[in-house]
Image (spheres, rainbow, N blue to C red):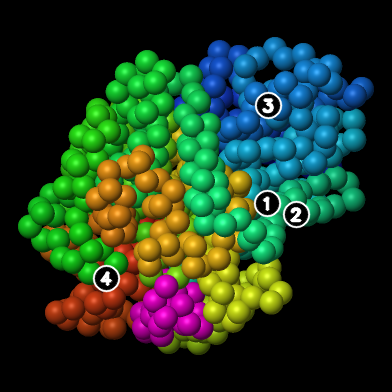
């Protein structure tokens, strides 16, 4: 994993702009602490920061190779999990490899097949290739956007980077935000409209897409979409196929030249990955697998059961650790750490985000990095297999809006009346929701209920899953930790997308087909444990701390919050007994304390990034 950035300019000689590209690259040092490189030619400049995982000695970037009477240079962030298959194919076509790295395989694949190479890739990636003779830039992003790629076109110049901060380091890109950007922050955040870069004129390449940029301009293409078709397999075949696909995806993602570990919460998803990884380690004589879990001081005292979080993880972690014989590390954090890390989480995301849900993860990744460079995590299983309550609870399934944004009206109340009128959060949410529904590849002849579940799955893939993948990438890469997400393997998604709900909901349980497929791999009680999301602190000291922090911010009338929120209303909320709502205002975890922490993050973001409202 790495950080990439670049600049294409038809008017300037970029060989004279080394200082600028170095500055852009340096903003991504956390993504690639092991090495760095610069490529400069007349009209193209690339910067690269490297986290060495495969072939640490020879996989340096930017990497240049020659082929088909031309010269090509790549900067690449990601991992390919079918590298060897592609390498062997290319060898039969006459290519000779100087390294063991997937970077070289990817570059030669592009030289051989052009944009069609994307169809052959199994992995997570964002990369840029410069075609020297044709003066063409090619940019591409993986099917689900596990790896980020932002860009902006200004005055016929294209500037790109793995994170927003790399673009903002360029003198032409300003930290300006207009009404639409404000609507994204205050109506939808921490989710974002697919392709939206928040800052004015900035975009993010959508998952499954690529760009060609040359003197004629910019062209965007789509190389992958979900295809809806009738599921032909019977139940037993479906169970076996799911088992094979999941097992294969996990085993492929264990390949590394540096230490690998897994996240372990004692839930179905992380336990599945851990079980298959631990068996792989034992079978190959690699010793005990390292596993990591997170918890908070006094959570055992203050945990309260909710519909979204039915039980605590601690007992289940111990049960799973013993059953799988892993070398487990339990990491404990306290309230002051969570509050202090809100600042680091903003810098990692370049935006206000998921408050302590972010800050706890960045702290967690800091601890894991002391032991390993690569981790496997269970993100995406809930979106793929239908694990959230909005897939099966009628009131949530039929909600005519994003089900993780159930209190948009209440969110509107926190805004200043002027801003609320300008951005109209309720209408903005509905607009984005309707736009997304138009993209859903429905299956002709499906019942209305099954069609609605397909819509729900698509909404989750393009919005909720994207939010969680953003979080995992930014918080982990901020600490130089590569996190892989096996359930995001496109082969799994393509197959499960068309499994009818009656099979997915096997035994009347969320992710039932996955649970059935894993019979014998996990202990039965772990296998059928009720879903519980990523753990958050329940310690009342956290609410007290963020109230105190926000009160101090609001005591300064120079705070940028005075430009955007209803100060009187916020103060009333903090003075009330209830933090804000007894139900989440985003997702499953973000309730009152997270609202106050989010506003703290907005203040941090607007100050640190010198955000200007235009």
Secondary element type, mark 4: loop
Secondary element type, mark 3: helix
Residue 568 image point, x, y percent: 28, 83
User: Would you say residue 131 is visible in this rendering?
Assistant: yes
- Few, some or many C-alpha atoms within 10 Å of disc 1 (few <14, some 14-19, many ≥20)? some
Residue 25 image point, x, y percent: 57, 34
Secondary element type, mark 1: loop
> Can you tell which mark lies on residue 85?
3
Of marks 1 and 4, which one's residue comes earlier in the chain? 1
Separation (CA) of disc 3 from disc 4: 45 Å
Q: Which residue is mark 4?
A: 307
Separation (CA) of disc 2 from disc 1: 6 Å
Q: Is residue 16 above or below residue 345?
A: above
> Can you tell which mark lies on residue 208?
1
Q: Residue at x 47, y 82 (%)?
A: 399
Of marks 2 and 1, which one's residue comes earlier in the chain? 1
Residue 322 image point, x, y percent: 20, 34
Q: Is residue 211 above or below residue 466?
A: above
Q: Contact, CB < 8 Å: mark 2 with mark 4?
A: no
The answer to whether 84 appears left or right of 299 in the picture is: right
Q: Which residue is mark 2?
A: 222
Q: Residue at x 84, y 21 (%)?
A: 93
Separation (CA) of disc 1 from disc 4: 34 Å
The answer to whether 166 appears left or right of 303 in the picture is: right
Q: Is residue 498 above or below residue 332?
A: below
The answer to whether 266 appears left or right of 8 in the picture is: left
Q: Contact, CB < 8 Å: mark 2 with mark 1?
A: yes
Q: Single out the mark in the foreground, 3 or 2.
A: 3
Residue 391 image point, x, y percent: 45, 70
Q: Contact, CB < 8 Å: mark 3 with mark 2?
A: no
**Where are the magenta residues, as a range?**
392-415
Q: Residue at x 24, y 50 (%)?
A: 525
């Amino acid at each position: 994993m790495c950080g990439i950035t670049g600049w294409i300019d038809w008017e300037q000689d970029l060989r004279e702009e080394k200082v600028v590209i170095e500055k852009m690259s340096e903003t991504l040092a956390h993504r690639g602490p092991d090495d760095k490189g610069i490529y400069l030619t007349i009209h193209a400049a690339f910067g690269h920061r490297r986290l060495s995982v495969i072939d640490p000695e020879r996989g340096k970037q930017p990497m240049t190779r020659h082929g088909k009477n031309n010269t090509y240079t790549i900067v690449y962030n990601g991992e390919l999990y079918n590298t060897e298959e592609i390498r062997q194919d290319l060898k039969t076509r006459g290519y000779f490899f100087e390294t063991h790295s997937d970077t070289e395989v990817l570059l030669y694949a592009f030289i051989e097949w052009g944009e069609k190479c994307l169809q052959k890739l199994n992995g997570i990636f964002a990369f840029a290739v410069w075609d020297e003779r044709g003066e063409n830039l090619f940019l591409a992003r993986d099917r689900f956007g596990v790896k980020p790629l932002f860009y902006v076109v200004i005055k016929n110049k294209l500037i790109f980077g793995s994170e927003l901060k790399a673009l903002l380091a360029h003198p032409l890109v300003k930290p300006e935000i207009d009404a639409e950007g404000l609507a994204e922050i205050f109506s939808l955040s921490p989710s974002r409209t697919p392709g939206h870069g928040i800052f004015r004129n900035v975009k993010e390449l959508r998952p499954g897409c690529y760009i060609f940029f040359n003197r004629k301009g910019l062209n965007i293409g789509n190389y992958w979409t979900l295809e809806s078709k009738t599921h032909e397999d019977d139940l037993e075949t479906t169970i076996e196929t799911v088992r094979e696909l999941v097992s294969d995806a996990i085993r492929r993602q264990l390949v590394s030249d540096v230490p690998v570990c897994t996240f372990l919460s004692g839930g179905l998803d992380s336990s599945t990955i851990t079980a298959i990884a631990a068996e792989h380690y034992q079978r190959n004589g690699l010793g005990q697998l390292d596993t990591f879990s997170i918890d908070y001081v006094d959570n055992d005292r203050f945990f309260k059961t909710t519909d979204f979080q039915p039980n605590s993880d601690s007992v289940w972690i111990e049960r799973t650790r013993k059953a799988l014989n892993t070398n487990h590390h339990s990491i404990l954090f306290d309230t002051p750490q969570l509050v202090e890390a809100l600042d680091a989480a903003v810098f990692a995301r370049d935006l206000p985000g998921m408050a302590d849900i972010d800050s706890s993860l960045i702290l967690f990744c800091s601890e894991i990095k002391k032991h390993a460079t690569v981790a496997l995590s269970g993100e995406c299983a809930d979106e793929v297999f239908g694990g959230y309550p909005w897939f099966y609870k009628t009131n949530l399934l039929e909600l005519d809006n994003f089900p993780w944004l159930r209190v948009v009206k209440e969110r509107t109340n926190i805004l200043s009346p002027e801003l609320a009128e300008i951005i109209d959060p309720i209408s903005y949410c509905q607009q984005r929701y309707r736009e997304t529904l138009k993209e859903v590849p429905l299956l002709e002849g499906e019942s209305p209920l099954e069609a609605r579940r397909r819509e729900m799955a698509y909404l989750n893939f393009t919005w909720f899953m994207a939010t969680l993948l953003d979080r995992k990438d930014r918080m982990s890469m901020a600490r130089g930790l590569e996190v892989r997400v096996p359930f995001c393997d496109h082969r799994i998604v393509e197959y499960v997308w068309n499994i009818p709900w009656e099979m997915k909901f096997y035994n009347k349980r969320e992710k039932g087909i996955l649970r059935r497929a894993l019979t014998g791999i996990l202990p039965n009680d772990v296998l059928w444990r009720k879903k519980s999301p990523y753990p958050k602190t329940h310690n009342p000291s956290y609410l007290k701390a963020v109230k105190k922090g926000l009160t101090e911010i609001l005591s300064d009338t120079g705070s940028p919050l005075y430009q955007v929120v209803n100060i009187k209303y916020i103060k009333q909320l903090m003075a009330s007994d209830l933090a804000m709502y007894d139900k989440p205002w985003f997702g499953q975890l973000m309730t009152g304390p997270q609202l106050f922490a989010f506003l703290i993050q907005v203040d941090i973001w607007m100050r640190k990034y010198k955000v200007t409202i235009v």
